[in-house]
Amino acid sequence: MEYKTNMKSLFIIVNAGFSSDVIDIAREAGAKGATIINARGESASHHMFMGITVDSEREVILTLVEAEVAEKVMAALSAKTGHQSPAHCVCFTLPVESMIGIGGFPAQCGI
């Protein structure tokens, strides 16, 4: 069964090693869970080490939250782990039109 929602998909990108801190901040702001994906950053400046190109390690944290919670999470992350911090947090949201297979979410969404 498909559910219509007022949810946002929150994408949080941080330097490797900071995902636990970011998830703690997100939970304090109302997020309930998250998925962490290991990634690597790619930019114009590469670092060479013994002839091997080394790109910076990143972690992508994905979570589904209600629209109001997304704003709270983003504000908290900006204040504590923003682009000027060692975490180099970048965060954005995308609307979630519908979803399936998320246990417990329909009740939380008022459906």
Image: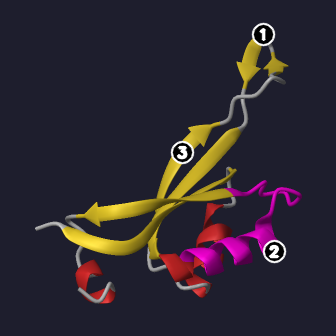
Q: Are marks 1 and 3 in contact (CB under 8 Å)?
A: no
Task: Give yes or no for residue 98 being in the magenta stretch.
Answer: no
Q: Which dot, 3 or 2, sits closer to the camera?
A: 2
Q: Nearer the viewer, residue 105 or 52?
A: 105
User: What residue is rendered at 54% in x and 58% in y?
Assistant: 61
User: What residue is rendered at 41% in x and 72% in y?
Assistant: 7
**Disc marking residue 33:** none
Q: Nearer the viewer, residue 2 or 87?
A: 2
**Disc 1: which residue:** 51
Q: Amino acid at mark 2?
A: Ala
Tell me which corner region of the image, top left, top right, bottom left or bottom right, holds residue 73: bottom right
The percent coordinates of residue 44 (x first, y second) are: 80, 23
Q: Are marks 3 and 2 in contact (CB under 8 Å)?
A: no
Q: Give the residues drawn in magenta, as a range.
A: 70-90
**Disc 2: which residue:** 79
Q: Residues within 10 Å of mark 3 (few under 14, many from 20)?
A: few
In the image, residue 5 sits, relative to residue 91, either above or below, namely below
- Quarter of the image with the C terminus is bottom left
Per the model, the C-alpha gap separating discs 1 and 2 is 38 Å
- Quarter of the image with the N terminus is bottom left
**Disc marking residue 38:** 3
Per the model, the C-alpha gap separating discs 1 and 3 is 24 Å
Q: Which dot, 1 or 2, sits closer to the camera?
A: 2
Q: Which dot, 1 or 3, sits closer to the camera?
A: 3
Task: Give yes or no for residue 77 being in the magenta stretch.
Answer: yes
Residue 86 appears in view: yes
Earlier along the polypeptide chain: callout 1 or callout 2? 1
Most extreme residue toward the right, as rendered?
Answer: 84
The kind of secondary structure element at disc 2 is helix
Q: Amino acid at mark 1?
A: Gly
The percent coordinates of residue 16 (x first, y second) are: 67, 50
